[in-house]
Amino acid sequence: MAFLNPYGDSGLALLRRFSGKWGRRLWYRWLRWRLPVACGPVDCLGSCGTEAVLPFSCEDLSAYTKEEIRDMLHRIMMEKGAQNIVVERYLEPYLEKSLQIDGRMMLLLMADDILRQVCRKHQIARRELNLVIVASGPSETTWLIRKLGNGLNRLAVVTREPEAYQELAREFFEEEGLLVRVCARPLTQELYGNVVIELGGQGKEDWLFYRPGTIVLNLSGNGFRTVQARTCGRNLTCYNCFLIRAGGQVWDRRILQAVIFKTSTWMGGGQLQNSGKIKEKYGLEVEKTGLET
C-alpha cells in the first residue's frame, strides 16, 4: 500500500509534504486509488455492518470538499463490498442515510430485549403491559412506538409536544384498537402504567408521578446514581443500560460505540473508567474529555 523513498519516509508521509493545488490533487488521487483502509465485520446488536479504519484524521480531510470525501467513502464500500459502514461521528454527514446503521434500530433492539427480560423476571405477560414512554424527540419516539405498540392494550406518551402525537394516537386506535394516551408536561396527576421507558434521560422530572411499584427502564445510560437516590421511599424498580446485558452484549449505546472504535472520546472518561470489567473485556482506551455525565 505504501512505497518508500531513499530517506525512509513512507509514500503517505512523502505525499503530505506536497503543498498547493497540484499537491492537493496528488494527495487526493493517492487517497482515492490507493487507500490503505483496514475493514472488518462488526455486529451492532444484530445489525451487521463494516468497520473501516481510515488512514487520516479530521484535519487531513478538512482540505477536501464534501463531494470528494463522499466519493472516497463510497469507493471504500464498493471495493470492500460493504452494505453498511460504521464511521466516526464527524464523517456521518458524508454518508447517505441508507448506508449507515440506523441508531433507532439500536434503540429498538435495546428496548425490545429489556422488555422481554423484565416481563420474564417479573412474570408480566406482554398483553398486561401498561407501557409509559417518556419521549425524547417526536421522530425517534414515534418510530419506536410504532415498533413496540403491537400486542399492547394500553400505552401512554409523556412529552412537551403533545400535538406531535395526536395523529399517531388516532391511527393506533383505528387500526390496532390500542389506546394511546398523550400526557403533556408538566405532569399534574399520577401516570397509569406498570412499566416506564425513559428515552434520553428525559424522565428525571417525572418520577414523582410514577405509580408505586412501577418498573423504570432507563435507556439513556445517564444518571443511574440519581435514579437510585430518587427511588428512596418510592418502591420503584429501576433498570439501567449498564446493568442489563444479554449474551455478552453491552446494552448502552455510548459504550457500544466505544467497543466498536476501541476508544472513548465523546463520553465522560470517568464513566467508562468506572466500568473496569467492560474496559478490560473489550480492550478500551479512555481519553479525557470535557463532557462528563
Image (cartoon, rainbow, N blue to C red):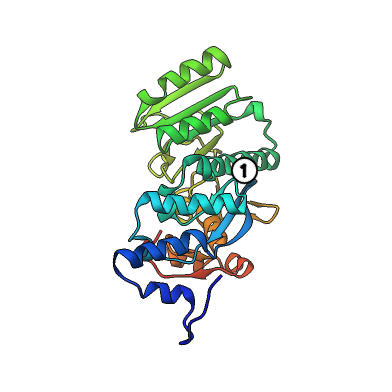
Residue 175 image offset from top left, x and y in percent:
56, 14
Is residue 53 toward the left or the right of residue 186 in the image? right
Q: Which residue is mark 1?
A: 114
Number of residues whose C-alpha sits closer than 10 Å to that of mark 1, classed few (under 14), some (14–19) or many (20 or more): many
- Quarter of the image for the N terminus: give it: bottom right
Residue 207, above or below 91: above
Residue 114 image offset from top left, x and y in percent:
62, 43
Residue 158 image offset from top left, x and y in percent:
42, 32
Is residue 124 toward the left or the right of residue 24 in the image? right
Q: Which residue is pictured at 41% across the width and 20% down the height?
A: 166
Residue 71 image offset from top left, x and y in percent:
45, 50
* 285 or 216: nearer the viewer: 285
Is residue 290 visible in the rendered image? The answer is no
Amino acid type at circle 1 is: Ile
Residue 267, above or below 283: above
Mark 1 secondary-structure assignment: helix
Question: Can you tell which quarter of the image residue 293 is in?
Answer: bottom left
- Of all residues, the one furthest to the top in this rendering is 174
Q: Which residue is pictured at 40% across the width and 48% down the height?
A: 93
